[in-house]
Image: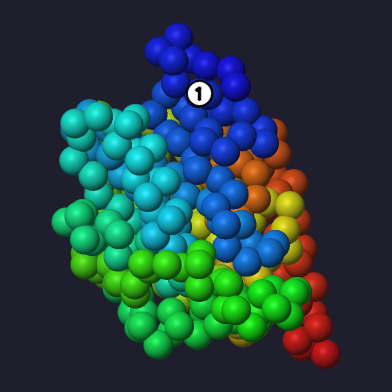
Amino acid sequence: MARFPDGHPRHEKGGVNLRITSRCYAVTGLAFALPWAVNAGFVVGAGTTLVIDTGPNTLAAQTIHGYAVAAGAGNRLIAVNTEPHFDHLGGNGFFRERGIDIYGHCRIHRTAAELAATIAECNQSIPDRRRRERNEAAVLFQKTTAANPNRPVPEETVLELGGLTARLLFTPGHTPANLAVYIPEEGVLYAGDAVVSGLSPNLECGSAADWRRWKQSLARIAALQPEWIVPGHGPVISRQEREPALDRIAAALDEALAERET
């Protein structure tokens, strides 16, 4: 892996821990359920490190936390969830046990019963019958508990990280409670599932009204003209890849809307 002069890894396609800019990182490909390996990230300010999404489980949260602490040694740590689905906030319990504040849309509220249902769904997706019968998906979620953000976000806000700002922007569509995190000084947008890279957008639980709002969120993201987009799933998107990536999602939404209206 190529490195900056300070020894930290820099962005490379296909990497696992990606340093996108001097202060923005992505942690990609965290295990969940195929094809939905999930992404997280963190931003290192002068005094505060912001983690974006805590991963789907405690195992992933340990990885994200370890990278973030190493990159921002001595910093205070805070976190934000980009949406209510467990693949993005299943690691919340690990962070809250350590007294780390977690920001998230004020409509996020998940329960232990919902986490159990998600684990059961993951187990049912295992092709091998014997593995399903042994409930092997539970291994991925060991020591994982349902924990909600303790810093609800009722409106768009800005977090000061020390020399950097993190703008929490509402980007509804995938869910009504989606938000993105934009670091204007670095030109990096952590999009959550408003943007997926190389995958079809998840339209299984939305309505036509949701999809129209999603298109509006995509237009807002495009207007920001970020240098880098960290999607909820799939490879990091560069400036050169930005327009076709957003157009592909918008086209999928248009197709779904046309089918819904016929």
In terms of depth relative to the viewer, which is nearer, 42 or 214? 42
User: In the figure, is residue 211 to the left or right of 65?
Assistant: right
Query: Measuring 23% from the left and 61% from the top, which residue is drawn there?
Result: 96
Rendering coords of residue 33 (x, y %) = 63, 66
Find residue 194 and report its image quarter: bottom right
- Which quadrant would the N terminus be assigned to in this image? top right
Q: Count residues near mark 1 (Cα–Cα under 10 Å), then give few for <14, some for 14-19, many for 20+.
A: some
Q: Which residue carries the number 1 mark?
A: 9
In terms of depth relative to the viewer, which is nearer, 231 or 74? 74
- Residue 235's place in the image compared with 133, above or below, is above
Rendering coords of residue 78 (x, y %) = 25, 49
Secondary structure found at label 1: loop
- Residue 84's place in the image compared with 95, above or below, is below
User: In the figure, is residue 259 to the left or right of 64?
Assistant: right
**Amino acid type, mark 1:** Pro
For the image shown, how many numbered marks are present on the structure?
1
Rendering coords of residue 121 (x, y %) = 59, 81
Query: Measuring 65% from the left and 50% from the top, which residue is drawn there?
Result: 234
Query: Measuring 34% from the left and 72% from the top, which residue is drawn there?
Result: 145
Rendering coords of residue 211 (x, y %) = 62, 75
Find residue 214 and report its image quarter: bottom right
- Residue 110's place in the image compared with 89, above or below, is below
User: In the figure, is residue 110 to the left or right of 60?
Assistant: left
